[in-house]
Image: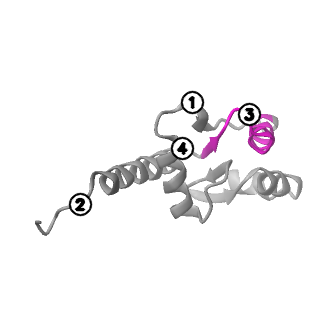
Amino acid sequence: MGVNSSSPSSEMSGAVTNTIRQRISQNTVVIYSKTYCPYCTMAKEVFDKLRQPYDLIELDQVQDSEQIQDALGKMTGTRTVPRVFIKGQCIGGGTDTQSLYKRGKLQEMLK
């Protein structure tokens, strides 16, 4: 066993985490969602109202959804969706997004 040996799953996990980090650094708003989730719909509707474009990843429509959710769990402390990122910072889920919007904080974050 070499010094640099690692399992394929840890390599996959690292690659997934890197992809997530790259995506959230390159887009103002990123939403990790599932098409059937009402809280995900809530978050997307807030950004639609604001006419704020967002990068959307529907986890129920991608092959590596479990790995993505695991990586999001490690990065944010929870695997639940939606996971909403603004300017690289996770702001939480649907209820968090709606609350920030209603208080005018979300609009400030987007400036």
104 vs 38: above or below = below
Q: Dot 1: what SS?
A: helix
> Residue shown at 51%/33% (left/top)?
62
> Residue shown at 81%/54% (left/top)?
95
Q: How far apart are the two marked residues, 2 and 1, measured between alpha carbons?
A: 29 Å
**Mark on residue 36?**
3
Q: At label 4, which amino acid type do we have?
A: Asn
Q: At label 1, which amino acid type do we have?
A: Gln
Q: How far apart are the two marked residues, 4 and 2, measured between alpha carbons?
A: 31 Å
Residue picked out by circle 2: 6
Q: Dot 3: what SS?
A: loop
Residue picked out by circle 4: 27
Question: Mark 2 or mark 1: which comes first in sequence?
Answer: 2
Q: Dot 2: what SS?
A: loop
Q: How far apart are the two marked residues, 2 and 3, measured between alpha carbons?
A: 36 Å
68 vs 96: above or below = above
